[in-house]
């Protein structure tokens, strides 16, 4: 049986890391597409040359021609520009919306059966626009944000509790921006919810609040340190986790930016929610109950996403 084909649209920092991870994990053959001539070709050759030492079986190809993504099983989209210090993800809207148009058309023409994972920011609005431009089924187009935000939350919690990251579960919902909603009630250390850990004296509410805030600012913290771009190792790893769930029909329960029509009382909105990812793409949106405070935070996040979607419609009339 032929190996799955993974198309990476954008061969920048995240795209290169995606290619390396996909090859090392032998998820399939990788095609890297970019408008920059030489970048996808150079990176794919460089990674292929790591194959003999690493011992993976995967072919890698770099291209500037959309025709080469033909028949891809998975497309991971990172095309666009990342933010610089002082910028919010929302500042990228205008330029990255134009990029989503060309990417959506390229995928629709050459890889209409692919499971598409968008990473380009501002995430929730960009995944919505990409779906509109591509016309692919809603269950096959999603965005990577919740896995990364939850991973950041889990990392900070593991440092606080001095326990393995493997034993920390966490849920971050809502839009991938300043209004994201880290849900402490649904986050645990080996099944013990965080509010119980506060009661048990393992941490204090103040420390937990600070960790929640650090999670919300997790992307900006990296941008501030790097100065020339945004995070790429953890974002790529998170998207690979989602791609693997699809390719191996793992039915993973992962938070991601999915199309929500019904659950959470939402009507046709892309936003971060808990989902099940398997061979049918986003197979389910898990409609968890939110308490009053969580609902207020979630609503605020939804409003922020809706504002960006309206801004997209204002920029490109074909989306209105
Ligand atoms: N089609 C294809 N590729 C494009 C296009 C386009 N229309 N426009 C830009 N690109 C490519 C650039 O040439 C570059 O190689 O997208 C790549 C982006 O790479 P980086 O600048 O290194 O950005 P990266 O850190 O990978 O982040 C990409 O993901 O997390 C988000 O905010 C981040 O929106 C940004 C995206």
Image (cartoon, rainbow, N blue to C red):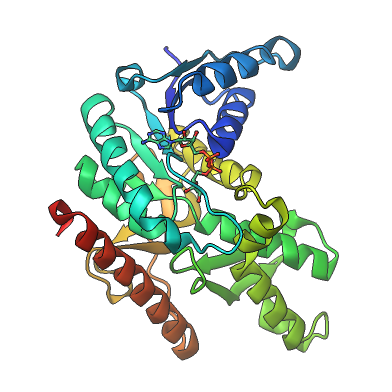
Q: Position of residue 124 (x, y in %)?
A: 38, 59
Is residue 204 rendered to the left or right of residue 145? right
Q: Is residue 257 above or below residue 228?
A: below
Q: Is residue 14 above or below residue 61?
A: below
Judge whether residue 192 can be spotted in this image: no
Assign the C terminus to one quadrant of the image: bottom left
Q: Nearer the viewer, residue 152 or 223?
A: 223
Is residue 58 rendered to the left or right of residue 169? left
Q: Tell me what residue is drawn at x 24 percent, y 67 percent.
A: 310
Tag count: 0
Q: Tell me what residue is drawn at x 44 percent, y 81 percent.
A: 290
Q: Position of residue 257 (x, y in %)?
A: 40, 57
Q: Tell me what residue is drawn at x 82 percent, y 69 percent.
A: 161
Q: Quadrant of residue 301?
A: bottom left
Residue at the right extreme, as displayed: 162
Q: Position of residue 226 (x, y in %)?
A: 70, 50
Judge whether residue 229 can be spotted in this image: yes
Assign the N terminus to one quadrant of the image: top left
Q: Position of residue 164 (x, y in %)?
A: 80, 57
Q: Quadrant of residue 202?
A: bottom right
Q: Nearer the viewer, residue 81 or 250?
A: 81
Q: Is residue 221 above or below residue 106?
A: below
């Amino acid at each position: 049986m032929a190996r799955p084909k993974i198309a990476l649209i954008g061969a920048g920092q995240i795209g290169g890391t995606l290619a390396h991870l996909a090859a090392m994990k032998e998820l399939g053959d990788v095609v890297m597409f970019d408008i920059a001539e030489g970048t996808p070709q150079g990176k794919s050759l460089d990674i292929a040359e790591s194959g003999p030492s690493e011992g993976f079986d995967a072919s890698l190809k770099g291209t500037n021609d959309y025709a080469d993504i033909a028949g891809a099983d998975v497309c991971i989209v990172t095309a666009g520009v990342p933010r610089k210090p002082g910028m919010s993800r929302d500042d990228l809207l205008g330029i990255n919306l134009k990029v989503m148009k060309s990417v959506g058309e390229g995928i629709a023409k050459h890889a209409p059966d692919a499971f598409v994972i968008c990473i380009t920011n501002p995430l929730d609005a960009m995944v919505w626009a990409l779906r509109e431009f591509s016309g692919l089924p809603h269950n096959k187009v999603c965005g990577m944000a919740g896995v990364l935000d939850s991973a950041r939350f889990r990392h900070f919690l593991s440092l606080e509790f001095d326990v393995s990251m493997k034993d920390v579960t966490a849920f971050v919902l809502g839009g991938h921006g300043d209004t994201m909603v880290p849900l402490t009630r649904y986050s645990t250390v080996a099944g013990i919810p965080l509010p119980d850990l506060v009661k048990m004296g393992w941490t204090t509410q103040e420390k937990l609040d600070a960790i929640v805030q650090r999670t919300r600012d997790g992307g900006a913290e990296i941008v501030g340190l790097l100065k020339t771009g945004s995070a790429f190792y953890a974002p790529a790893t998170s998207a690979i986790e989602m791609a693997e769930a699809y390719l191996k029909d793992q039915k993973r329960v992962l938070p991601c930016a999915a199309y929500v029509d019904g659950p959470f009382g939402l009507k046709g909105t892309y936003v971060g929610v808990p989902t099940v990812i398997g061979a049918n793409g986003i197979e389910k949106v898990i409609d968890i109950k939110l308490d009053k405070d969580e609902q207020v935070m979630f609503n605020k996040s939804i409003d922020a996403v809706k504002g960006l979607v309206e801004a997209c419609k204002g920029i490109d009339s074909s989306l209105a």
